[in-house]
Image (cartoon, rainbow, N blue to C red):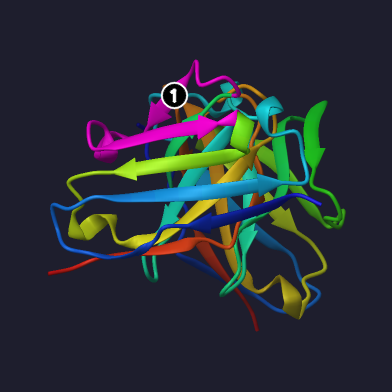
Amino acid sequence: QPVLTQPPSSSASPGESARLTCTLPSDINVGRYNIYWYQQKPGSPPRYLLSYYSDSDKGQGSGVPSRFSGSKDASANSGILLISGLQSEDEADYYCLIWSTNAWVFGGGTKLTVL
Amino acid sequence: EVQLVESGGGWVQPGRSLRLSCAASGFTFDDYAMHWVRQAPGKGLEWVSGINWNSGTIAYVDSVKGRFTISRDNAKNSLYLQMNSLRAEDMALYYCAKGYSSSLGYGYMDAWGKGTTVTVSS
């Protein structure tokens, strides 16, 4: 089962944007995968945010603000979660998820700090 | 409203067994795949196992293959995880999660319980 690499931490100030990455191993092509993103706050289960396959094939979780968006960077073989207009409530852990070789695989997670 | 309530967690010695249960309500249980996801203390999420709507497709993370068995009883709206030969590294909060579709590999986990804690220690 593949390993999805996420930076352990990231930080940004309120009102700024945060770009969180999820890098797939070089032997699997990010272009072939739906990337799902979750937010988790301390003491709570994960919350589904969105999915991204392409600009024409993406989904937004119920009640998730449009300032959360997904994309891909093919050159980096990465999925991207972009959070614009950061708010203090966005401080949380963020996980990516894919389905690969008959298993679901989570990334290691990124702790986002809103300074 | 979708509700998933896990139970069966507790303290167990290494090598012993434990059976987790998840009681589902608020949706048509046998229309959806179901999953177990765990989170070790202070660590990230790890998908453990999933089962499609009719138990025809089942999958596990490599680290639990041969030790854990997932099952479901659609008549009882319940999901189970039989965990044998438990190890210290299995210690975690175990979440029950509802799949987005009936298929194991299509869609994501769109609803989660609050979890049940498994402690493995001598």
Crowding at label 1, few (<14), some or many (≥20) Cα neighbours within 10 Å? many
Residue displayed at 63% across by 41% down = B98
Front one among B97 and B69 = B69
| Residue extending farthest top | B56
Q: Give the range drawn in magenta.
A: B53-74
Residue at (74, 76) in percent of width and height:
A89
Image quadrant occupied by the C terminus of chain A: bottom right
Magenta stretch: residue B42 in it?
no
Asked whether residue B101 is in view, the answer is yes
User: Which residue position holds label 1?
Assistant: B58
Horizontally, residue A13 falls left or right of residue B17, namely right
Location of residue A90 with respect to A70 vertically, above or below: below
Give whichever of B58, A109 is nearer the camera.
B58
* Of A65 and B31, the residue lying toward us: B31
The quadrant holding residue A64 is bottom right
Q: Position of residue B5 (x, y in %)?
A: 59, 56
Residue B73 relative to residue A69: left or right:
left
From the viewer's perspective, tell me whether residue B48 is left or right of residue B17.
right
Q: Position of residue B27 (x, y in %)?
A: 77, 39
Say left or right for A41 vs B51.
Answer: right
